[in-house]
Amino acid sequence: MAEIIRMPKMSDTMEEGIISSWLKKVGDQVNSGDILAEVETDKATMELESYDDGVLLHIGVKNGESVPVNDVIAIIGEKGENIKEILKEEETKEKETKEEETITIPEINDISKDKRLKASPLAKKIAEEKGINLTNIKGSGDGGRIIKKDIEENTKIINAQNSTNIILPKTIGEESFDEVPISQMRKTISKRLSESKFSSPHFYITMEINMDNCIEGRKKINETSEVKISFNDIIIKATAAALRKHPMINSSYLEDKLRTNHHIHIGVAVAVKDGLLVPIIKFADNKSLSHISLEIKNLANKAKNKNLQPSDWEGNTFTISNLGMFGIDEFTAIINPNDSCILAVGGIKNTPIIKNGEIVPGNLMKVTLSCDHRIVDGAMGSAFLQTLKELIEDPIKILV
């Protein structure tokens, strides 16, 4: 008996998928476990596996086409089996579903169609002589009747407009644009962040961090470390340590309950062609700087090559977005669902500072914490940033 293959839900946020390429063609023998096609989801390109044995009788979606979750994409059955009835039945079900979901709106009579143009005989004669369209004139007579005065006023307005017209030189140019379909990733990013922005009451607090000691400490570490440590690695490690001291920052608002996470999984925003992915450093507080550095590089490469798997991006308890490498001094970020906060990190800027009563050169970095006010208040967020500042300004503390 023929089996219908539907577009599976390959991630918690997936609503539709794109068939990147079919690896089997109609007429091919298929065994359970064979890969039928590659599917582009909102976060990665994944393999569509067959759970049935038989012959691939029908492919309903071309390469590059988008398909909603649960729609029919293929049929597997016995060779020579008639699939027309199956497809017809599916089409009937879909039609019935659409009919049930359709709300019939009663027609509204356009009473304006029944209205006749009211104008005096003299007004009609003048309008005809001057080529004036009476439908564009508002009547001032009884019941909105157009009279001679209305025609004269309309003529004055047109003459005044014509007298002020300025002849401008002709502009040479051609309007043009490109359009491309919005990717599944971009659609999901748009939907999830819109939901977060408008459902979570955001507020923002910014703090400056003196990076002098951190710069010197990183330099010494990299003199002996086999793995090059970045400032981002240090920020992740310091953030994890600060979250351990402020567990409410590491919590989630789940509509009818508040979850305080005992584990620390830090999502790190990575820019890719179609948008932004947030792979996760799990148990970040238990990992060394070199471990974090290697894992970040590995996840970033997987993200850019669209090889991330659900286990790489699911389960974040806090997120960091760093735009410092792009020369951004400071910015605000939208909280990543279901976190309570996100940390936006700016670049390190050489700035005059006051030290021991004297103005000396220094290196400052601004960080902005976006907070969900349903969970985190100003004092709580400020205390977290103060701890983070202390750890980054004295990085030896995160190595203990």
Image (cartoon, grey):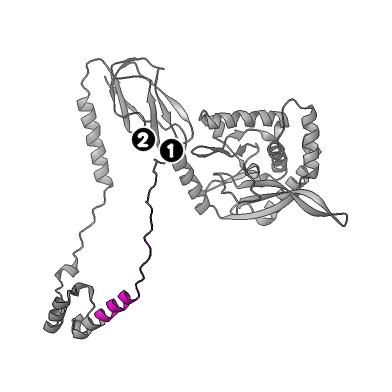
Instruction: Read off the magenta span.
Output: 154-169
Marks 1/2 in contact by CB < 8 Å: the verdict is yes
Tag count: 2
By secondary structure, the bulk of the magenta-drawn segment is best described as: helix
- Amino acid at pointer 2: Ser
Left or right of 206: which side holds 276?
A: left
Q: Residue at x 47, y 34 (%)?
A: 11
Residue 25 in the image: above or below residue 321: above
Residue 44 part of the magenta-drawn span: no
Say few, some or many: other residues with alpha carbon within 10 Å of mark 2 (under 14 / 14 to 19 / 20 or more): some
The answer to whether residue 67 shows anywhere in this view is yes
Q: Position of residue 221 (x, y in %)?
A: 79, 32
Residue bearing the label numbered 1: 184
**Residue 266 in picture, x, y percent from top left:** 63, 38
Please report the residue visible at 65 percent of the width from the left and 37 percent of the height from the top. Answer: 264
Q: Is residue 214 left or right of residue 151?
A: right
* Quarter of the N terminus within the rendering: top left
Residue 399 or 302: which is nearer the viewer? 302
Q: Residue at x 14, y 70 (%)?
A: 114
Residue occupying the point 25% across, 15% down: 79
Residue 228 drawn at (x, y percent): 72, 30
